Amino acid sequence: MEIHSECDLFILQIHAFLDNYFDVGELLEDSETKQQAITKVSELEEQLGIVSLEIWFLLEFYDGFVLQANERIQELESGNCSKMGKRMIK
């Protein structure tokens, strides 16, 4: 667009203003939505931390249980082997 007069310059400035116009209400709404999302993410991260800790405790309990079960199985197998050996000797 070739500028020929002050009127043309003024029209150009109006178009530039309209092109760069921000809807403050929309920006505030976007800001509120973003803040709600940040709050929700924070709540979910806290819940995830709690669940992760619970899972860790359950895995520790499970590992202990499996260890005890394996020890008991070895005791029973050793006992059965001893009994079988005694039977074969008789």
Image (spheres, rainbow, N blue to C red):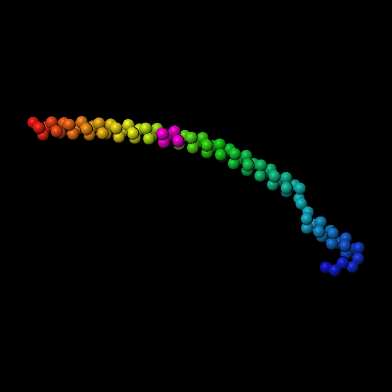
As drawn, the residue found furthest toward the left would be: 90
Q: Does the magenta stretch include residue 53?
A: no
Q: Which residue is drawn at 89% across and 68% down?
A: 4
Place of residue 8 in the rendered image (x, y in percent of width and height, measured from the top left): 88, 64
Closest to the observer, 60 or 16: 60
Q: Which residue is drawn at 80% across and 57% down?
A: 18
Apparent side of residue 30 relative to residue 11 in the rendered image (left or right): left
Tally the numbered discs: 0
Place of residue 45 in the rendered image (x, y in percent of width and height, measured from the top left): 56, 39
Q: Residue at x 63, y 43 (%)?
A: 37
Q: In this view, does 87 lie above or below 31?
A: above
Apparent side of residue 16 relative to residue 83 in the rendered image (left or right): right
Q: Residue at x 30, y 34 (%)?
A: 70
Q: Quadrant of residue 69?
A: top left
Apparent side of residue 21 relative to residue 70 in the rendered image (left or right): right
Q: Is the magenta stretch mostly helix, strand or loop?
A: helix
- Residue range corresponding to the magenta coloring: 56-60
Place of residue 86 in the rendered image (x, y in percent of width and height, measured from the top left): 13, 31
Q: Quadrant of the C terminus?
A: top left
